[in-house]
Image (cartoon, rainbow, N blue to C red):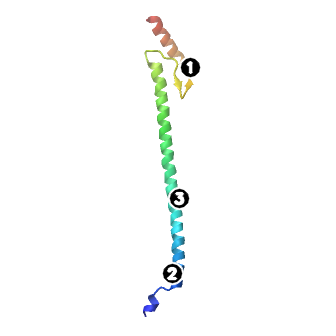
C-alpha cells in the first residue's frame, strides 16, 4: 500500500526536469515584466528631466528679456538668441530715457 504513494528515482528525475523548466519560464517572465517596468520608469524620468531643463532655459531667456538691465545676449541651450523687436525697442527707450 505504502509503495503506491512513494516517489521513485525515475519520478524524481522527471519532476526535477519539470520544475527546472517551470522555474526558467517563470524567470523569463519576471525578467520581461521587470524590463518593461524599468524601461517605462526610465522613460518617465528622462522626459521629466528634459521638461525641467527646457522650462529652466525658457525662464532664463524670459528673465533676461524682462529684466531692467536689458540683457539682449540671452542663450537657449548655448545658442545665442536675437531679442524680439518689441524688447529691443523697450530697451532703447529705457536707455534714451535714462
Q: How crowded is mark 1: few (under 14 residues within 10 Å), some or many (20 or more)?
A: few
Q: Which of marks 2 and 3 is nearer the N terminus?
A: 2
Name of the residue lying farthest toward the bottom = 1
Residue designated by label 1: 82
Tell me residue 48's x, y (percent).
47, 40
The nearer-to-camera label among 2 and 1 is 2
Residue designated by label 3: 32
Picture disc at residue 69: none
Question: Which residue is depicted at the point 50% across and 42% down?
Answer: 46
Q: Does the CB distance between marks 2 and 1 fall below 8 Å? A: no
Q: In this view, does 51 lie above or below 64?
A: below
Q: Earlier in the sequence, mark 2 or mark 1?
A: 2
CA gap, disc 2 to disc 3? Answer: 30 Å
User: Viewer-proximal residue, 3 or 45?
Assistant: 3
Question: Which residue is depicted at the point 50% across and 49% down?
Answer: 40
Question: Which residue is depicted at the point 47% across and 8% down?
Answer: 95
Tell me residue 89's x, y (percent).
51, 12
Q: Is residue 8 above or below residue 68?
A: below
CA gap, disc 2 to disc 1? Answer: 79 Å
Q: In this view, does 29 lie above or below 8?
A: above
Residue designated by label 2: 12
Q: Is residue 82 left or right of residue 2?
A: right
User: Viewer-proximal residue, 88 or 53?
Assistant: 53
User: Viewer-proximal residue, 97 or 27?
Assistant: 27
Q: Does the CB distance between marks 1 and 3 fall below 8 Å? A: no
Q: Does the CB distance between marks 2 and 3 fall below 8 Å? A: no
Q: Residues within 10 Å of mark 3 (few under 14, many from 20)?
A: few
SS at mark 3? Answer: helix
Q: In this view, does 93 lie above or below 5?
A: above
Amino acid at each position: 500500500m505504502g509503495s503506491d504513494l512513494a516517489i521513485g528515482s525515475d519520478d524524481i528525475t522527471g519532476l526535477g526536469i519539470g520544475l527546472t523548466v517551470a522555474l526558467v519560464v517563470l524567470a523569463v517572465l519576471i525578467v520581461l515584466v521587470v524590463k518593461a517596468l524599468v524601461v517605462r520608469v526610465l522613460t518617465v524620468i528622462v522626459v521629466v528631466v528634459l521638461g525641467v531643463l527646457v522650462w529652466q532655459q525658457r525662464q532664463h531667456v524670459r528673465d533676461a528679456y524682462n529684466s531692467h538691465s536689458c540683457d539682449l545676449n540671452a542663450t537657449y541651450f548655448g545658442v545665442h538668441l536675437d531679442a524680439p523687436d518689441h524688447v529691443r525697442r523697450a530697451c532703447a527707450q529705457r536707455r534714451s530715457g535714462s
